[in-house]
Amino acid sequence: MLRLRTALSALLMSMTLSAQVPDNLVVEGVPAHPAELLQDVGRYLEFRTASFASWHPVRREMLVGTRFADTLQLHVVAQPGGARRQMTFSAEPVAGGVFEPVQGRFIVFSQDSGGGEFYQLKRLDLADGRITLLTDGRSRNSNPHFSRDGRWLYFNSTRRNGRDTDLWRMNPLRADSAELLLEVTGGGWGVLDVDADGSRVLMQSRRSINDSDLHVVDTITGKIRQVSPAGGNGVSHGAARFARDGASVFCTTDRDSEFQRLARIDLASGAITVLTPDLKWDVESFEPSPDGRQLAFSTNEDGISRLHLLNLKSLKLKPVAGLPAGVLGGLEWHENGRDLGFSLAHAQSPTDAYSLELKSGRITRWTESETGGLNPSDFRPPELIRTKSFDTLSVSAFVHRPDPAKFPGRRPVLVLIHGGPESQARPGFQARYNYLLNELGIAMVIPNVRGSAGYGKTFLTLDDGFKREDSVKDIGAILDWVAKDAGLDASRIAVMGGSYGGYMTLASLVHHSDRLKCGVDVVGISNFVTFLTNTQDYRRDLRRVEYGDERDPKMREHLERISPLNNVARMRVPLFVVQGKNDPRVPLTEAEQMVAALRKQGGTCWYVMARDEGHGFAKKRNADFQFVSTILFLKEHLLR
């Protein structure tokens, strides 16, 4: 009888979970989601964002990306605080869009299928809402840029061989007009700008995050000329734009510096002039004004964005006041030359669209995204801490602490590791993760270990190749810091990360299992050799520069030795693995082999795989299921 009751209980639990699971998910080991938990967490799942995408060229209207159903779509906002009028309606999310630059008659936007990142360019005609596929439906197409008169659309495409990101051009009103302008080698080429008369295209060739050059392509002859100074191995040139007069190029570069500085390259002489010699942080984005008189740019100062204006005649800098400490992006001037649009997120607000009025300095918030009825002022900003690693290198972390009045005593900790690895933890909005802070009392420690962006190019390369596990030692230093903090409980620590952060999670479970309770690996690398073998062709060479070339016998031996899959016997705590079937970056096989290996040795391993996702979950129903499952996992293996 006892066995029968146990079997019936298991069957009922399985049926309950099946009723909750979207049919596009494969779910293994995850218990049913209790109704009371779904109700409790519901508010935290209903936040939205609104990212600025483009100005209408004639009217003072914004194109923004936001979600009202399951996926992010394009909307038009006609005035600050105005209603978001939905323009695209699709089961798949839209990845950016731009108005036709003369009259705004149509929008060109990017969209993939199932998270595979083989983006297609599409045209949305605003007169009738008709959508036309512009690209071939198979290749990967990126970086669309209009000529100023709107006659031509320039973009990169792998159409020729599936690997190299060649330069193409088309009449956006004729899908059959696409023509190959320039064949290139490698997947690191990208269109950055088109000059005023459409006769030249500015392109970047990127070999790694710290090695890239700038080139100008003549659209009539097809000839290409490098315009960044020669002999620049180990020098990165990032964002770049033609000056209004076409005689020079503005760019960011770390030439002769640890940081990305704003510079101007004279196209006739090749002379380069640094415009921000005294700034000690990266210039992360910039945009010249339509009249060529001003240049707006943002700096990344310990993860916080600061906005500045540069008078291009006097070279006088003017900081922009009144912005909260957060993360800024998407700078674009309106053609009126008075309004600068951008997106901003911070601890107490999701990403929203803003504008700066040049003359008055007034900052206007155009959208106010919902936070599920929660009061955003209750969300606590993080503190920035620093500690020394094994070799005395200083590493930092943003620490989010629960309200001590509600959750007194030492708190359990979730260490959240960013991806990239050439990325950075920054003080943005924590969205659904505020549930962990506000309802479960879990502190979140979000580190920037060596290899993170934002701290200079030397710091960026300290985990390359044979130095890969030094960054895992940095996690050990973060755990040491947690043990010394009076408000944190070093006996209850979990680790979680996505992509490269997923590798770091697995590696932390290998090296620090005795100090951790559990881990959550989201689309993470489990074996560097199989990863490099199976990642998409257009990405492989760029990743070899970062991780090492597996074709070299010594490097292959090193990569095999440090790969978590080959050290699974040292992983002695429960693991939750999340993966998208169509992931072009970290293939499905990376997750499957990790799950199989851990279970083979008798370890606890939960698994969720989405058949309609890629490198992370973009569809709300999938992301919600993942998050609620993560809560259950942390309750079971961290909080208990």
Image: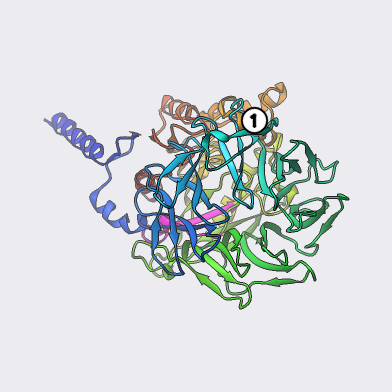
The picture quadrant where one finds residue 45 is bottom left
Dot 1, how many residues are within 10 Å of its Cα: few (below 14), some (14-19), or many (20+)?
Answer: many
Residue 433 in the image: above or below residue 545: below
Q: Is residue 125 left or right of residue 530?
A: left
Image location (x, y in percent) of residue 428: 52, 59
| Residue 508 point in image, percent of width and height | 55, 40
Q: Residue furthest bottom?
A: 360
Residue 505 x %, y %: 53, 41
Residue at image coords 64%, 65%: 306
Q: Residue furthest left?
A: 1
- Provide the residue designation for mark 1: 164
The tally of labels here is: 1
Q: Which sits in the foreground, 480 or 308?
A: 308
**Magenta segment boundaries in residue numbering:** 427-447
Q: State yes or no: residue 338 in magenta.
A: no
- From where the camera sits, is residue 49 visible? yes
Q: Quadrant of residue 592?
A: top left
- Left or right, residue 202 beside residue 80: right
Secondary structure of the residue carrying numbered label 1: loop
Would you say residue 617 is visible in this rendering? no
The quadrant in which the N terminus is found is: top left
Pinpoint residue 335: horizontal percent, then vertical percent. Answer: 60, 63
Instruction: Reply above or below: 163 against 335.
Output: above
Q: Determine whether 252 is above or below 360 in the image.
A: above
Which amino acid type is marked by label 1? Asp
Residue situated in front as seen by the camera: 365 or 196: 196
Query: Is residue 632 found left or right of 347 in the rendered image?
Result: left
In reply to whether residue 445 is colored magenta, the answer given is yes
Q: Nearer the viewer, residue 284 or 421?
A: 284
